[in-house]
């Protein structure tokens, strides 16, 4: 392990010197330390907490906290609304996002068209509603891919240690050394497909090291807990220890970072589209609309403000959700 | 300490080669570099074959990579297809981006840490809530939207700044672009410092320092701040590389002719030598920044020793 050591031999990576890192990072960048929810394994599980005498788990504790947290409720409602809109956009608008009339290009708000028209004369409101589906799809699928790949690779590296760990840590470093936007420009500049898959694939390819580092650190912390040692002494197999003891106690930081990362992936899609390598028409996405509108920003800022506003609210909702979950899972802040 | 540095330097070697190989392969996937040379027309096959030989593109990728790296270590980053030396491009581009990055880092340190300390000491008060909401807004609006809006408002509507930066790119012109580049990281630094300060404020050593009658200013600057800065230093250090690579968007908005601009042009024109050369330097900067951060740990926290 390359990390500097504390005198008691603890490595710094899994525990973090200063505790929680507040958020994941900009544009899918680096968060080296897990939030201190990594210490979730030592959550208070004493019988004194609950009247029935049944020990409360970290998760039921967290859920009790979350239900009372206004930030969680608001962001949850926003996200639920977004998911519903992306499943049934026609419930909010009767228009067709690809039905455009050049004669109306750049016109402002009109009855029946509250957000006005964009540079091609398409209804901005309809396009903003339909854009939700693409952004949510990109965010959710990229996050799922990153979370699964990252936690499996990082978790196994943390659990088994040794050579595999050393190799994986160096590979993670290699990916970190490449700036994300730059990698996107290089890799996606050849793509001609207008589907969302190349963009999602790129995000998974460059995003997994972020989760992998966190999962690795988190598993190393969980592995040192007494109950894991006890399970090992009782002769539990590796797979049983991983599935029954380690995963439930190490997954919290991964969930938190993945939630926050979901928002940043949605923003990254927009940035890539602005640079001309993201999604391509006829796909309808906020990123495409924002970048198209940026040419007309001086004359018709409304074209930019509506999709950008929708994007910002979405990203904000996921960041706040991740924040709320992190606070609930972090026993230190209680 | 010396042994630690040597071990870290040795570990950087595979990472450096891995990352540059990765980008080399990516650029190769990017498409036929010769096609970009003939403009929009199809290349004449004989000319294409000759150009390929001239640039060594008829060899296998592995061999091309080895040749390239061999040249890099003698200071030869190759020639862009327009005949300009890549090192010449770097000599004009890097100073601009380094100035931009310095402005951005200064914003992060001065504004970010100040706001973080202020809010961390006043957790739950209106100042704290206000700044927190502001950081969330900054984080959730993509950088290019922030940049375009600031350019529109400050540059076009109110005329406080010039909307585009001149080729000289002096520090004065780079203030607003630097702020845009720093914006998201600035918000993270604020939040990170705030959490760290709020957590350490309850630490025993702070109580001891107050109890022995140290002035508040000294308790904060010598005891609280120094102990709280470790995660912040990590973040800012790793951010240096990210800022230089991420300047593509900011440089595009404000028409700054720095590294991001050259990289963007290189990618659009399929100028592989430029892209690989600039990325190689960026990777080196990133690795060096990370090493310096790890060494700074020991300065900030003497409990950390390097085995």
Image (spheres, coloured by chain):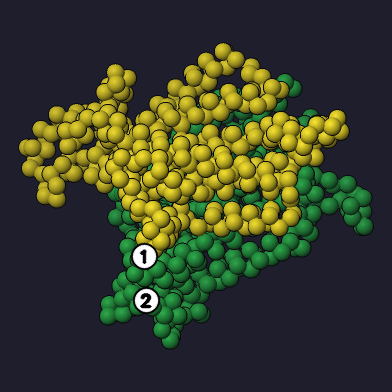
| Numbered badge on residue A297 | 1
Please tell me the colour of chain B. Answer: yellow
A302 shown above or below A62 = below
Q: CA distance from mark 2 to mark 1?
A: 13 Å
| Numbered badge on residue A316 | none
Can residue B80 be seen here? The reply is yes
Question: Which residue is painted at 74% across and 22% down in the image?
Answer: A8
A281 shown above or below A32 = below
| x and y, in percent, of residue B26 in the image | 34, 39
A68 shown above or below B19 = below
The one nearer the camera, B216 or B55, is B216
Chain letter for the residue marked with disc 2 in the picture: A
Where is residue B1, by image quadrant?
top right
Question: Which residue is painted at 46% across and 64% down in the image?
Answer: A308
The one nearer the camera, B165 or A329, is B165
Q: Is residue A48 left or right of residue A175?
A: right
| x and y, in percent, of residue A7 in the image | 72, 21
| x and y, in percent, of residue B97 in the image | 38, 38
Question: Which residue is painted at 15% across and 42% down in the image?
Answer: B37
Q: Which residue is mark 2?
A: A117
Q: Is residue B66 left or right of residue A111?
A: left
What chain is the green one?
A: A
**Disc 2 element:** loop
């Amino acid at each position: 392990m390359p990390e500097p050591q504390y005198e008691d031999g603890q490595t710094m990576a899994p525990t973090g010197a200063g505790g929680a890192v507040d958020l994941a990072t900009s544009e899918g960048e680096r968060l080296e330390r897990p939030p201190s929810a990594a210490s979730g394994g030592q959550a208070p599980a004493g019988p004194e907490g609950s009247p029935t005498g049944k020990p409360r788990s970290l998760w039921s504790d967290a859920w009790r906290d979350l239900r009372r947290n206004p930030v969680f409720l608001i962001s949850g409602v926003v996200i639920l609304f977004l998911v519903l809109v992306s499943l049934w956009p026609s419930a909010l608008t009767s228009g067709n996002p690809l039905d455009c009339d050049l004669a109306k290009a750049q016109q402002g708000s009109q009855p029946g068209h509250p957000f006005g028209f964009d540079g091609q004369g398409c209804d901005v409101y309809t396009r903003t509603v339909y854009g939700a589906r693409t952004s949510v799809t990109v965010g959710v699928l990229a996050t799922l891919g990153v979370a699964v790949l990252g936690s499996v690779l990082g978790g196994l590296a943390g659990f088994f240690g040794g050579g595999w760990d050393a190799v994986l840590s160096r590979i993670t470093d290699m990916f970190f050394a490449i700036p994300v936007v730059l990698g996107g420009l290089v890799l996606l500049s050849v793509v001609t497909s207008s589907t969302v898959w190349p963009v999602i694939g790129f995000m998974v390819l460059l995003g997994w090291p972020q989760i992998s580092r966190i999962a690795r650190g988190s598993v190393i912390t969980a592995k040192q807990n007494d109950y894991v040692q006890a399970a090992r002494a009782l002769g539990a197999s590796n797979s049983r220890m991983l599935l029954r003891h380690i995963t439930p106690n190490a997954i919290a930081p991964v969930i938190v970072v993945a939630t926050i990362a979901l928002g940043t992936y949605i923003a990254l899609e927009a940035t890539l589209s602005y640079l001309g390598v993201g999604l391509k028409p006829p796909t309808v996405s906020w990123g495409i609309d924002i970048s198209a509108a940026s040419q007309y920003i001086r004359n018709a800022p409304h074209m930019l403000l509506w999709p950008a506003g929708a994007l910002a609210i979405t990203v904000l909702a996921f960041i706040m959700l991740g924040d709320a979950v992190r606070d609930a899972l972090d026993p230190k802040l209680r | 300490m010396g042994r630690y540095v040597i071990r870290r330097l040795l570990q950087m070697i595979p990472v450096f080669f891995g990352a540059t190989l990765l980008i080399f392969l990516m650029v190769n996937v990017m498409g036929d570099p010769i096609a970009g040379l003939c403009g929009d027309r199809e290349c004449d096959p004989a000319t294409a074959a000759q150009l390929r030989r001239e640039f060594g593109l008829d060899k296998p990728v592995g061999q091309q990579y080895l040749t390239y790296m061999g040249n890099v270590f003698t200071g030869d980053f190759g020639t862009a297809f327009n005949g300009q030396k890549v090192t010449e491009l770097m000599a004009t581009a890097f100073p601009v981006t380094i100035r931009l990055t310095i402005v951005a880092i200064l914003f992060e340190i001065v504004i970010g840490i100040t706001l973080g300390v202020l809010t961390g000491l006043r957790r739950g008060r209106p100042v704290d809530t206000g700044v927190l909401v502001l950081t969330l807004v900054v984080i959730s609006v993509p950088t290019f939207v922030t940049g375009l809006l600031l350019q529109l408002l400050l540059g076009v509507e109110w005329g406080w700044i010039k909307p585009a930066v001149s080729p000289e790119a002096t520090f004065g012109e780079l203030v607003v672009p630097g702020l845009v580049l720093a914006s998201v990281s600035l918000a993270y630094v604020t939040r990170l410092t705030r959490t760290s300060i709020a957590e350490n404020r309850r630490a025993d050593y702070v109580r001891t320092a107050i109890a022995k009658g140290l002035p508040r200013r000294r308790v904060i600057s010598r005891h609280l701040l120094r102990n709280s800065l470790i995660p912040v230093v990590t973040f800012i250090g790793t951010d240096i590389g990210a800022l230089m690579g991420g300047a593509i968007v900011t440089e595009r908005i404000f028409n700054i002719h720095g590294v991001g601009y050259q990289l963007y042009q290189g990618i659009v024109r399929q100028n592989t030598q430029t892209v690989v050369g600039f990325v190689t330097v960026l990777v080196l900067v990133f690795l060096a920044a990370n090493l310096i951060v790890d060494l700074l740990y020991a300065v900030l926290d003497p409990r950390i020793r390097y085995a």
